[in-house]
Image (cartoon, helix red, strand yellow):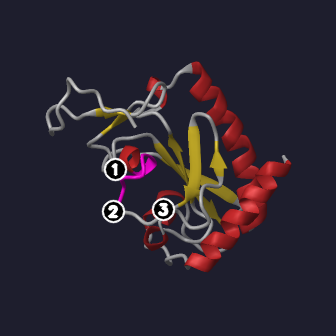
């Protein structure tokens, strides 16, 4: 990992790390995690489901999600769709097409909800939340509920199955 010598690490001027095209920021949780410095978080259960050129897909943190909720995160430090290159947009579309189909089959979901806020961690990451047909909560009310934390074994099994289905597509 290369750190630009002319830049000092600080809150006002975070250090850029990594090589082109994956410029990362020293003050970004997701960038530090991708650089292997994110000691705050455990590795994703089941490892990365997809390791694309521009994006990574992993199971969501166990305490914050039901089994089968996944996160797509950009490799390059960017905030939202408006900052994506054409190549990033194309790869994201391709990943989502395959990922949504695999998630529906693997989890038995009727819908896949998408959630992208980038408020607490300002680095592009898109949550895909499977929603089964049962239950009275829908839409924002469903997303706002407290999820039943996923077990590590369930998350790993679902991650393996999603990866297998994506590799076949």
Q: Mark 2 falls on what kind of element? A: loop
Q: Where is residue 119 in the image (x, y as percent from the top left)?
A: 32, 46
- In this rendered view, identify the residue nearer to me: 164 or 127: 164
The answer for how far apart the CA atoms under marks 3 and 2 are is 24 Å
Stretch of the chain drawn in magenta: 33-39
Residue at coordinates 34% horizontally, 42% vertically from top-left? 122
Label pair 2/1, CB-CB below 8 angstroms = yes
Task: Report which residue position mark 2 lands on.
Answer: 40
Q: Earlier in the sequence, mark 1 or mark 3?
A: 1
Task: Report which residue position mark 3 lands on.
Answer: 143
Q: Position of residue 67 (x, y in %)?
A: 60, 71
Q: Earlier in the sequence, mark 3 or mark 2?
A: 2
Residue at coordinates 57% horizontally, 40% vertically from top-left? 55
Label 1, residues with CA under 10 Å away: few <14, some 14-19, many ≥20: some
Mark in front: 1 vs 3: 1
The answer for how far apart the CA atoms under marks 2 and 1 are is 8 Å
- Residue 26 included in the magenta stretch of the image: no
Label 2, residues with CA under 10 Å away: few <14, some 14-19, many ≥20: few
Task: Report which residue position mark 1 lands on.
Answer: 29
């Amino acid at each position: 990992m290369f750190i630009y010598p002319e830049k000092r690490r600080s809150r006002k001027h975070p250090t850029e790390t990594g090589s082109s095209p994956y410029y990362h920021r020293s003050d970004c949780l997701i960038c530090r995690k991708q650089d292997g410095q994110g000691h705050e978080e455990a590795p994703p259960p089941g490892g990365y489901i997809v390791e694309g050129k521009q994006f990574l897909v992993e199971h969501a943190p166990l305490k914050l999600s039901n089994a089968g909720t996944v996160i797509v995160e950009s490799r390059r430090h960017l905030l939202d769709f408006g900052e994506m290159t054409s190549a990033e947009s194309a790869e994201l579309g391709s990943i989502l097409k395959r990922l949504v189909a695999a998630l529906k089959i693997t989890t038995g979901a009727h819908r896949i909800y998408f959630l992208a806020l980038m408020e607490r961690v300002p680095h592009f990451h898109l949550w895909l939340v499977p929603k089964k047909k049962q239950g009275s909560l829908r839409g924002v009310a469903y997303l706002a509920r407290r999820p039943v934390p996923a077990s590590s074994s369930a998350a790993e099994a679902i991650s393996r199955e999603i990866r297998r289905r994506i590799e076949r597509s």
